[in-house]
Amino acid sequence: MFKINGNNQPDNEILKKYRIDSAFGCYTRNALEMEIWPVVKEQIRYIIFADVDEMRVANQKFGYAQTDRKIRKAITAREGDIVVARWYSGDELVFFLLDGPRVGDPTQYAQRVQGRLHQAGLSATFGVVELERGKKARLAEAVGRASGLVQKTKAGGVRDCILTEPMTLSTA
């Protein structure tokens, strides 16, 4: 149950726990869907979906807390205007690279995250999708396309790679 402060508003510390993923230090999916997407959807230039490879094996090797710390360190080295959130399961992440002068190359960004994961003894498979400028995308469609690249590749037995595909979205 939420604590209510003197202004009849939920306590900020409790809300923070629901907005920030405690293991990885990034946003939760709920925060992404309800708070972030509505504000930044027209500013997103690229979506990167990452699925950490063999998470169960990593947890057995390093322990849950240590694996979480390794992932947290790899994804929190921030560059430019980037929003990071945990997606459905513990091994899936979504990165939004916002349009602007600091957007940079999304594949190179994914390579840098991948490099930090490698240094930590982990790997991930990345799907990079470009959003058409000036178009509004639906969250499920945009993330689903990037996720689909990753899932299709992993189903074929390929891991630890970066896949890219341009994307044209209908207006939402």
Image: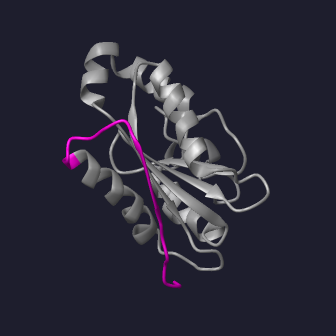
Q: Nearer the viewer, residue 38 or 47?
A: 47
The span picked out in magenta is: 155-172
Residue 25 visible in rendering: no
Q: Nearer the viewer, residue 15 or 59?
A: 59
Q: Residue at x 73, y 47 (%)?
A: 80
Q: Is residue 133 above or below residue 33?
A: below
Q: Is residue 73 above or below residue 142?
A: above
In this figure, what is the number of numbered marks?
Answer: 0
Q: Nearer the viewer, residue 39 or 159?
A: 159
Q: Residue at x 60, y 69 (%)?
A: 41
Q: Residue at x 46, y 31 (%)?
A: 23
Residue 100 visible in rendering: yes
Query: Is residue 157 shown in magenta?
Result: yes
Looking at this rendering, what residue extends furthest in the bottom direction? 171
Q: Residue at x 64, y 75 (%)?
A: 133
Magenta residues, dominant SS class: loop
Measured as percent of width and height from the top left, residue 62 is found at: 34, 14
Measured as percent of width and height from the top left, residue 42 is found at: 64, 73
